[in-house]
Image (tube, rainbow, N blue to C red):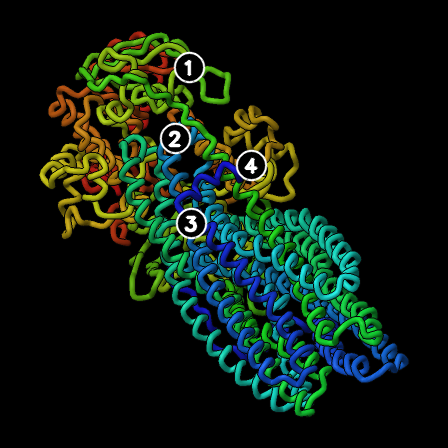
Amino acid sequence: MKEKQLRPKDPKKTLLRLFGYFKFNILLFIGGIFFIIIGSLSEIGINALLSPIIDTLVGGNDTGVFIRYILLMAGLVIVTSLSQYIGNLSMAKLAQRTVHKIREEMFSHMEKLPVSYFDKHSHGELMSTFTNDVDMINQSLEQSVSQILISVVTVVGAFVMMLILSPILTSVVFAMLVVMLYTVKYIGKKSAKNFRMQQASLADVNGYIEEMMTGQKVVKVFNYEDRAIRTFFKKNEELKNASTLASTYGVMLMPVMGNLSFVKYALVSMAGAYLVMINRLSIGNIASFLQYTRSVSRPITQVSNQLNQLFAALAGAERIFNVLDEEIEIDDGDVTLAKGCQGRKSSCWMVPKGDGTYEEVPLKGFITFKDVDFGYVSEKRVLNKINLYAKPGQKIAFVGSTGAGKTTITNLINRFYEINEGLILYDGIDIRRINKHDLRSTMSIVLQDVHLFEGTVKENIRYGRLDATDDEVVEAAKLANAHYFIQNLPEGYDTILTSDGQNLSQGERQLLSIARAAIADPVILILDEATSSVDTRTEKLIAEGMDKLMAGRTTFVIAHRLSTVRDSNAIMVLEHGEIIERGDHDDLMEQKGRYYALNAGIAELD
Amino acid sequence: MKKLLPYMKKYIKYAVLCPILMILEVTADIAIPYLMSRIVDVGIANQDIQYVLKIGIIMVAAALAGMTFGIISSHYGAKAGFGFASEIRLKLFEKIQGFSFANLDKFTVASLITRLTNDCNTLGQVTMMSLRMAVRAPFMMVFALLMALNINASLAKVFVVSIPVLVTVLVIILSKARPLFLKMQTKIDRVNAIIRENLTAIRVVKSFNRQSYEEERFKERNDSLMDTALKAITLIVFLMPVLSIVVYSTIVAVLWFGGKQVAAGTMETGQLISFITYITQIMMALMMMSFFFMQLLRASASVTRIVEILDTESELKADENPVEELEDGSVAFKGVCFCYPGSTEKTLKNISFHIDSGEVLGIIGSTGSSKSTLVQLIPRLYDTTEGAVLVGGVDVKRYDIKLLRDKVAFVLQNNTLFSGTIRDNMKWGNEKASDEEIIRALKLAQAWEFVSKYEDGLDHKVDRGGENFSGGQKQRLTIARALLKSPKIIILDDSTSAVDMATDAKIQRVFKEELKDVTIIIIAQRVSSIQHADRILVMNEGQIESLGKHEDLMISSPIYREIYESQQRGVGA
């Protein structure tokens, strides 16, 4: 895996944009910061009171003053804890609301991104932005921001108080802090380096585990167990050593800093005792001073950590904003679909004439390609000068090796991608003029990899048309030959499918996806035929379902098996992005070209 | 947890030394505030600079000693923690290697991976933390309490109030927060599930125009996640202020009562100061303990999952005096019934048949007719429920399992290639195979024709899962890999489905000619793949419908005829 960027490229800009999210929670933000500062100031106050209290004790028996100090201290204790509560709660709420909003925006933006975006970015990458990066923002808002604030206030406040108490002792503390800071930096560097090595080793071990577990049955069949254990042993040892080192440095920070601060404590005690002896300092001053020196050590140790975390969160935010800045699929088509005019399904394309009136073109499903060129990246042509037409109700099949451009052609019809050159007409209208939503609402795709959604069988079929009644769902299932197996499921149509329908067989999933397409009742159908081996009986069911589904619709079939294309009105044999043969089955068999070779089993598709 | 302890054995030295060193470190830490009080009460009181210097140097020495102990203890803790985790990870891996297919079916691949990765990592982390925290916090507390008692027993009574208060509040908050955090986790999973779903199925979403529908679905889950998160957070946020209020209230109380004692002359000022330091230490120790318990809770789920694997006994029992030689490749089923573990339904019903060594047997039948189940009994991937399977005239249960599986090559339906080179993958079949042997196997499986086209030939890279090969190529490679075992029996479980018919036919022909002594069993969907087998077994709903030659079956078996005819219609010609 590519190493993630830990530092933002433009922290200021990202931070400002992140602040934008606080707009609606401005009270939480300001209140949170305000109370956190108040909380740490009053905590400093508590410690500051130690000195006069002890001095009154040493000095004499002025009970009145003593009581007043104690009461003041008790008051400050209440202020401290209340402020901490309000401050922390506000920041936590702010964090939750912010990430909630970010998540919502990201998801809704993701839904609008063009398909090409998902080709260029792996699911893992997007998933990680969605989970890890968002989580980091949450954590740093919840903790880092307030910790850094507290640290700064505490350190500054404590230093001011220490300077007031004794500049000499403060310089001792300061010197020690410099030593401590350098130590933190040194250990931090070592630990980061070792941590990276641990991550690399961990990724290696995890990868091996994943591969071996996935192929575990193969391992058994080949008696490969001992060899797998040997390899694993080596990788596991490496990981152990890397983790041990990384953690040693990580954990070491605590005792090192803790004890260095004790050294500081000892030095201050000695110097302080000397100052008391020469009457430059009171005993109470030492008590307070010692409390302060203790209170600055922790923030110093932590602040670098917290800053790193904050920067990592900003880098994450930058990645999130990059996703949000991705251009969404543009939909500027001015031709829309209207229901309730003449023609099939009584739907019409409303083509604006430019003078405010519309020409009504009946929706039929006539598709024409004229000299279409296309490449996913502009330098590399995938399709070259494609010309074809499909009359309403016709079945057009594409045959060819993987990468010949079969799937690409269908991706252009529903405008998942835009063509580079040429023209695609839909009922005589340039498809670029048609509103995408309406364009796609007239088509259904049955894809090679069937994707189902978590939910009931019924919901999954209804995905094709949300307002379909239960009866219509059953009808669609019957048409797709899915009704029989659905009835045999434990809960029938209400059976809940796990993620992506893993609890159904491959064939059953396909039947469901046919039902889903059927309920949408499209004019145009795109079938990406399955390659996976389904048993003969289910295959027959699927083929029958498909046939019923295709009746009366313009259909584009991406064929992987030759047996299913024979009755097509036209078969296009594609190679390297060009149609090299075309015609119906009998024509092509007579031509004795590539199609014939494939049929006779002389050539192979792969 | 007890079950896992033996795996600590190798690291016991570190596991023991780590807390001991930690105790030494704590002792040094505890001594320092006490020494400080001596500086104030003895040194300053007597104006004895020599004494101050002496105690001061002891303090620095104690701190440095503490630091040294601390560093070594950290290192030992990490060694013990990660050593322990890696021992367990190795043990788990070994254990899974010893699993039977039936064992494997019980766990999903994803859950096995999580156990080996996340769970083991968590265990390592938590063990290391425990070795340090679990010792440090209580010792710190006890030591600090003892010191406080030593300084002033009557003042130490404040702890009788403050410690129980803090403990009670911590317990209440944490016990209420735990279920909320668990709930939050499931809600996070739900949110992630829908994101993943939309990422994989984006084309479906878009082609059905379901963007706003999905947004609604997401919104509902996202909202519900925030609600739970806010509830959990509201509770956890109490921790800090509660700690502050208890610590500082205790300090105020100590100042109040201690102040009176100082005024009355029964207590020294320096003692009061160090007493206050001990309060902070005690409370911090308590806090540390509560975090430690949270960690333990996190780890307990991992431990349960790990132990579950360790407790699983392999279902395949080895024979005490295993047969070490396999006579020939004949196979016999005698009244075999089979139920999958955990099921009472018979997947195979009363199967009996015999095939001679060197015979070619085709098996056909619809999905669910248990063709795969049948052949999996031969290399003992599963054990029969009733009856026996004989290979070379001997019950498979009596063989040394390694020998049996070496002699029975099985090309699985969902076959996997592994990352590495083609040669690496071929060597799965035979570790010592020479290039000549590998090429011969590739040729037999009709894979050499495309492998030889690669510039780097056998060194050609194979991506994880063999993703860089087409379905047909993958299948041919896996067949070649199986051939390298030089088996007596070879089973192809629908292994040529993605290979084109011409090549498929070539494989069948070559097998028949070149592997004369090898028993070949082929499961196929396509009649053409098995048509020329010596005999064909037609399976239907877990039973043998018929067994015979193609020509005979066309007459006697209605199922066979139906399959044949439906496929002929497809091919036409």
Q: Mark 3 points at which residue?
A: B13
Q: Quick check: do tags 4 and 1 share a chain?
A: no
Q: Which residue is drawn at 66% across and 37% down?
A: A469
Q: Quick check: do tags 4 and 2 share a chain? A: no
**Quarter residue B252 falls in:** bottom right
Q: Is residue A597 left or right of residue B66?
A: left
Q: Residue at x 19, y 49 (%)?
A: B460
> Residue B76 falls in which quadrant of the image?
bottom left
Q: Which of marks 2 and 1 is nearer the N terminus?
A: 2
Q: Marks 3/4: CA distance?
A: 51 Å
Q: Between tags 3 and 4, which lies in front?
A: 3
**Image-based side of A415 in relation to B141, left or right:** left
- How much space separates mark 4 and mark 1, taking CA atoms? 31 Å
Could one spot residue A431 in this view of the protein? no
Q: Mark on residue A497?
A: 4
Tell which subunit mark 2 falls on: B
Mark number, residue B385: 1
SS at mark 2?
A: loop
Front-most of residues B382 and B46: B46
Q: Is mark 4 on a helix, strand or loop?
A: strand
Closest to the camera, between mark 2 and mark 1, is 2
Report the chain holding disc 3.
Answer: B
Residue type at mark 4: give it: Leu
Q: What residue type is labelled 3?
A: Lys
Q: Where is residue A128 in the image (x, y as percent from the top left)?
A: 49, 58
* C-alpha gap between disc 2 and disc 1: 18 Å
Q: Is mark 3 on a helix, strand or loop?
A: helix
Extreme-right residue of the structure:
A64
**Mark 2 or mark 3: whose residue is earlier in sequence:** 3
